[in-house]
Amino acid sequence: MKDENTTFRKRAIEALGRLGPEAKEAVPVLIQALKDNEIRSYAADTLGKIDSEAREAVPTLIKLLNNKDMRYTIPNVLGKIGATSVPALIQALKDEDARVRSGAAFALTNIGAEAIEAIPALIEALKDQDRDVRQSASTALFAIGRVAKDDIPKLIEILKTGDKEARFSAARVLVKIDPGIEEAISVLVQALEGKDQVVRHVAIYTLSKIERPDPAYKKAVPSLIRIFLDNDPYNTSRLLAAEALGKISLWAEEAVPFLVKALKESESIVRSRVANALEGIGTREAIKAVNHYRKEEDLRARRSEQEKQRLYTKEEVLASKPDNELRWKVSVKGWNQDELLITRHTRWRPYEEKPDRLVIWLRVKDKFKILKVMEADAGSGFTHPASSFRYKEEIFLYIILDTGGSAGYNQAILLSILPDYTLQEIIFERAYEWYTESDRLNKGEIAQTESNIFTDDKLEFKFYIWNRGDPACCPSAGKVIGTYKIIGERRYNRDKKKYVADYKVVVDTFRREPIDNNEGH
């Protein structure tokens, strides 16, 4: 890493990162590299990959929390180093620089439950004069998820005497550890009715995570119903509102008619969330509707299975007719070099409810069988050709659905191709939603417009941040660049005689940067 060529130094640091904890002997050199502006971010990223073995770098990393170019990267790195950095982060919560205090709380968020000894300091940070520090402390306490009995009165005192933001932060934490505190619930209900989009979304998210119902939550039901009635199926707040209504259980009975009606919507993601919510509410009408929905889903699955058993010639697969026009086809390699064919077909009938259809085929000798059929609503479509990539030797398909909804973004769909050619959709944590829900935005900022580039063992994302008042074309607050990782494992279920997997795509690394004036959005 003493080479004068910056590119060579960066590649050397990246190589150390691939070794993970085995590169612990390089930690002193990487600490020195943190002083070099040109390779600092690469050194920090690699220290995070070395994990707890990089603990001697913690003091130097904490000093960088006030660096405007590194303030969003360092907390992530400290979080990966883990519990060994907690004592130093507790001290950093008392630093004179608000950026250091806020960054320390971010890092404690990433450490999660293992940062329990930081709880008293984080509660004090809820009273901080700096808004970013208060928000970060709130998120950290929510991530840790538990407090000592002696700390509960302190949070209730903030709930009664703090300013609006401090009260909201305390309420989030209190409803997680003791869902029956009425004062905390009232604060969250007020947030549901507020004009701040980010605060409202965080309030819905908090209510969707309550662990036991309480009659006091009934006051939140009218607001949650109004949010749920947004007609955009890919509005995350809408889906979380349905989940929250299910968690409120019997006290959300007035939502049942609206949820039952939503079971007839065409988007499977909406139907599934709504069915779960109705089961949670548990009234006779709700359970009756869910049972009917389950029967309809079983019938739909049987019809799909019958269609899959038939073999098609290549001519049939690629046939293009006026009511079933082939728009694109992509061939990818599966296990043992088997051929998979993905085709998009468009039906241009007047008033057609489902004009766009994506079909995934497996070659069987000289013919093809259907593995999966996906249909889009009117106004949506699979306009981008699908692609495949490998991640740690596993095979995945990446599909983009242009939603055309009011949210104005594309839906990324990831399918795992298992060795028996079971196709399993993977839970996908969208980076900009994670960033928003983690309270990393400043007041008045909105994050959206995410783009992904997925190649073998490299899952990259980028999204932009708008200040309130920015035109749609031109975000001014910055951009966030980072990578995802896929966690979970594949196994063979002997009872079902098929492969199953519990894969999930989550944010791995990220950094916030200013926008290049010459950059297009």
Image (spheres, rainbow, N blue to C red):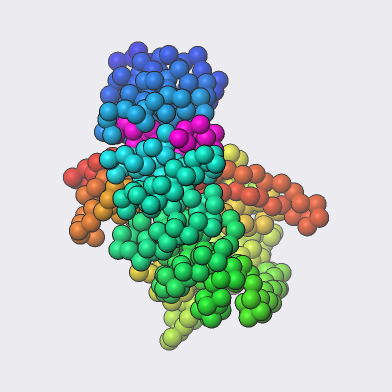
When the figure is inspected, residue 30 is found, relative to residue 216, above or below; the finding is: above
Query: Residue 433's spot in the image, x, y percent?
Result: 41, 53
User: What stretch of residues is rendered in magenta?
Assistant: 99-120
Name the dominant secondary structure of the magenta segment. Answer: helix
Residue reaching furthest to the bottom = 350
- Residue appearing at x 63%, y 50% in the figure: 502
Residue 398 painted magenta: no
The image shows residue 51, relative to residue 116, as above or below, that is: above
The quadrant in which residue 487 appears is top right
**In magenta segment, residue 100:** yes
Q: Nearer the viewer, residue 457 or 324?
A: 457
Residue 373 falls left or right of residue 492: left
Residue 295, percent from left and from top:
69, 77
Residue occupying image coordinates x 29% and y 44%: 131
Please give the name of the residue rendered at 51% of the width and 31% of the height, measured from the top-left corner. 117
Position of 242 relative to 488 (above/below):
below
Q: Is residue 383 visible?
A: no
Q: Quadrant of residue 317?
A: bottom right
Query: Residue at horizontal 33%, vertical 23%?
Result: 63
